[in-house]
Amino acid sequence: MNPIKKQDRQKENFDRRRRRKYYKPGDKVWVTIHPISRNNRSKKFMPKREGPYLILTLRSPVTYEIADPANPDQVLGTYHISALKDYHEPGVERDTRPVAPLRKRGRPKKLPPGSEPRRQRNQRGSL
């Protein structure tokens, strides 16, 4: 295969999985917490993200300054884009269709005596 075509195909595959989300000032985001930074609690019971926080400015193509929505004048910190996740306002767009019942797992229950067909077999298994 031609090396240029091979490089183009590798670039397409890489770009397919690449996160291309850019935030604008005013967007709300979740901030991922690192467990070591909050060592007063167990990592197991800590929330994964905090927020929502407000994007203030774009410092570089991959870093943003964030602030608390209650106090947008005070900068809380600068975060890399990998530590940010979109915040979606809780809305009324819920699915209100009835939920299908789960299929029961395991062996089916035995029917009461008399309702199941009886097989006529002797001890050796023949009819």
Image (tube, grey):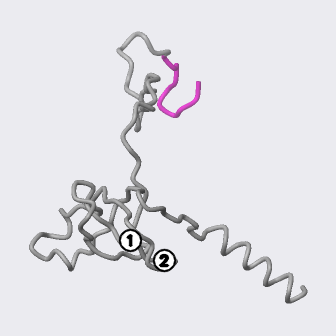
Position of 3 relative to 72 (above/below):
below
**Local secondary structure at mark 1:** helix
What residue is shown at x 72% (from left), y 78% (from top)?
A: 11
Q: Nearer the viewer, residue 91 or 110?
A: 91
Q: Residue at x 25, y 71 (%)?
A: 76
- Residue situated in front as seen by the camera: 60 or 86: 60
Magenta span: 118-127
Disc 1: which residue: 83
Horizontal side, residue 45 vs residue 22: left or right: left
Left or right: where 10 falls relative to 24:
right
Dot 2 falls on a residue whose secondary structure is: loop
Q: Which residue is drawn at 34% across and 59% down?
A: 54
Q: Where is residue 122 in the image (x, y as percent from the top left)?
A: 50, 26
Residue 124 among magenta residues = yes
Locate residue 86: give its quadrant. Answer: bottom left
Q: Where residue 102 sits: x, y (%)? A: 42, 32
Eyeballing the image, is 107 above or below 27? Answer: above
Q: How would you classify the magenta stretch by its main secondary structure?
A: loop
Residue identifier under label 2: 62
Q: What residue type is labelled 1?
A: Ala
Residue that extends furthest to the left in the rendered view of this protein: 40
Q: In which quarter of the image is residue 18?
A: bottom right
Residue 126 part of the magenta segment: yes
Residue 127, numbered circle: none
On-image quarter of the C terminus: top right
